Amino acid sequence: MTKKELALEVIERLKKEYPDAGCTLDYDQAWKLLVSVRLAAQCTDARVNVVVEELYEKYPDVASLAEATPEEIEKIVRPCGLGRSKARDISACMKILQEQYNGKVPDDFDALLKLPGVGRKSANLIMGDVFGKPAIVTDTHCIRLTNRIGLVDGIKEPKKVEMALWKIIPPEEGSDFCHRLVYHGRDICTARTKPHCGRCVLSDICRKNGVEDD
């Protein structure tokens, strides 16, 4: 089985296992996902979803958050960890959205990368979830699982994993595929405990179990 064939089989099996998988960060506007994904660095999505409730209650739009000082933002987002740097990035990012994009999030990948605190992972998440464009989000689950399964070969650097996956994942499948990897990584192919291979729908095609690709 080639890597491309393996990828298609993994995609189909995970679709059946997690048909409704989506982003686990709560948001109803693009700018809120931009804020939440910055806060999610080294923090759980569940905690971020709780913390942003207070943030959005006090600052309900881009304009009001852009006017807030980093110190005011930090007081609220501190429970997410790295409060000072995250607050500084959020403040700067909202100011740019307000001043350069009329309060809107740009739908251009390179423009997103120029925003403070936005890397390839965040930009891909925005492109896929908000704008419905091809995206591959190489978070820790994606990197761990694609290596274990055999879709990539011992690659740990996020951008290199992303580039390798673009070659074998159909563009229209990338965003949902990565969301399903998150669900599968949390429930079955875990990081901090031994993977639950006996309950895994991919066990018979996974390289971790001795299955080799062509």
Image: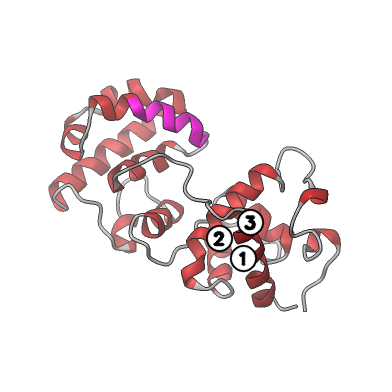
Residue 166 placement (x, y as % from top left): 53, 71
**Mark toward the start of the polypeptide (2 vs 3):** 3
Q: Nearer the viewer, mark 2 or mark 3?
A: 2
Q: Amino acid at mark 3?
A: Lys
Q: Nearer the viewer, residue 105 or 15?
A: 15
**Mark toward the start of the polypeptide (1 vs 3):** 1
Residue wearing tag 1: 11
Q: Are marks 2 and 3 in contact (CB under 8 Å)?
A: no
Residue wearing tag 2: 177
Q: CA distance from mark 2 to mark 1?
A: 6 Å
- Image quadrant holding the N terminus, namely bottom right
Horizontal side, residue 33 vs residue 45: left or right: left
Residue 75 placement (x, y as % from top left): 33, 20
The numbered mark at residue 42 is: none
Residue wearing tag 3: 156
Q: Nearer the viewer, mark 1 or mark 3?
A: 1
Q: Amino acid at mark 1?
A: Ile
Q: CA distance from mark 1 to mark 3?
A: 21 Å
Bounds of the magenta segment: 44-53
Residue 210 counted in the magenta span: no
Instruction: Give the main secondary structure of the magenta stretch.
Output: helix
- Image quadrant holding the C terminus, namely bottom right
**Mark toward the start of the polypeptide (2 vs 1):** 1
Q: CA distance from mark 2 to mark 3?
A: 18 Å
Q: Is residue 109 positioned above or below 84 on the image?
A: below
